[in-house]
Amino acid sequence: MDGILTTIQDTLEGQIDFEGQKSAEYITTILLAGTGLLAFVLGYVQQDIRLTLWLGLGGTAVAFFMVVPPWPAYKEVPEKWLPVGTGISGAGIEVDGKKIN
């Protein structure tokens, strides 16, 4: 059972870059606001709370499907990290009169 869960976790776990996070947030905001407004207006016109709730739930499900999985579009601008050991050690920082390495 642990092997299956590990396989599923490795498949679904993914890293997205900062631009991908920005895009995911923008998409979520637009989808939820748009479907919320649409659900409210149609529910008001039809005088049907059930329609409003189902449209809102559908919009939430679409937003969830579009932003939760780590789609390749969210990984297009990877961060360039410094190689290990290339940082400036200490950089002349002093704390309470003691130099930090």
Image (cartoon, rainbow, N blue to C red):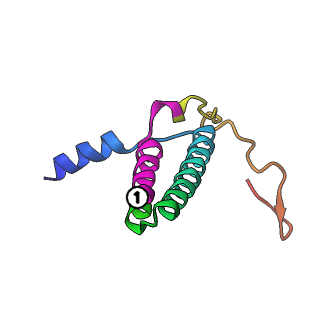
Q: Which residue is mark 1?
A: 57
Q: Residues within 10 Å of mark 1 (few under 14, many from 20)?
A: some
Residue 14 placement: quadrant? top left
Residue sitting nearer the eye, 44 or 9: 44
List the single residue furthest toward the front: 46
Q: Nearer the viewer, residue 79 or 11?
A: 11
For the stretch drawn in magenta, what is the main secondary structure? helix
Q: Amino acid at mark 1?
A: Leu
Q: Position of residue 18 (x, y in %)?
A: 62, 42
Q: Residue visible at 52% across and 40% down?
A: 16
Q: Residue furthest bottom?
A: 96
- Apparent side of residue 18 relative to residue 49 in the rendered image (left or right): right
When the figure is inspected, residue 38 is found, relative to residue 85, above or below; the finding is below
- Identify the element where label 1 is drawn: helix
Residue 90 as seen in the image, left or right of residue 52 = right
Residue in view at x 73 percent, y 46 percent: 89
Q: 46 or 39, which is in the foreground?
A: 46
Coordinates of residue 100 in the picture (x, y in percent): 76, 58
User: Taking 82 as reference, is 49 above or below it?
Assistant: below
